[in-house]
Amino acid sequence: MTITSFAQLKRELKPGVSLKLVDTNIDNHKSLGVVRKIILQQTNAVKFEGGSWLGLGSTGEKSSDFTFQENGFTHDNRAKHPDYGVMLRYEFVQ
């Protein structure tokens, strides 16, 4: 699956879809390499099994913070927030 826009990404991130965090700038991120299933979809975020959330506008994320790769996407807001920004790259898991 190749996502081409932020709107399409938000439509694809629905309950039952699984994602794997494959890269991040956060040292020792507890979810790196872990497959997690979405259990709740909201307009501004999705919730994973286990309780963590991926913001999609809930904490200031913009469509420009997201780029799209074959079978995945990257959320990167480090340019806007050099002191505390994050980069998270996810892949869809079948």
Image (cartoon, rainbow, N blue to C red):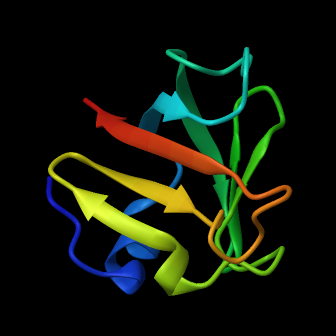
- Pick the front one: 22 or 27: 27
Identity of the residue drawn at 84% across and 55% down: 84
Residue 21, x across and y down, in percent: 50, 31
Say which quarter of the image contains residue 17.
top left
Q: Residue at x 75, y 58 (%)?
A: 85
Q: 79 left or right of 65?
A: right
Q: In which quarter of the image is residue 43?
A: bottom right
Residue found 64% across the figure and 71% down from its top: 56
Relative placement, left or right, of 57 versus 14 is right
- Where is residue 8 drawn, in percent x and y? 32, 78
What x and y, as percent, mark residue 46?
66, 57
Q: In this view, does 50 lie above or below 85?
A: above
Nearer to the camera, 14 or 77: 77
Query: In the displayed image of the protein, which residue is found farthest to the front?
Result: 82
Q: Measuring from the top left, give residue 66's x and y in whole percent.
A: 46, 70
Q: Which of 26 and 37 is in front in this view?
A: 26
65 with respect to 46 (left or right): left
Q: Is residue 16 visible?
A: no
In the rendered view, tell whether residue 83 sits above or below residue 32.
Answer: below
13 relative position to 40: left or right: left
Instruction: For the C terminus, give its image quadrant.
Output: top left
Q: Name above or below for residue 72 compared with residue 59.
A: above
Is any atom of residue 4 visible in this view? yes
Q: Quadrant of residue 2?
A: bottom left
Q: Which residue is drawn at 70% across and 30% down?
A: 49
From the viewer's perspective, is residue 86 above or below residue 32? below
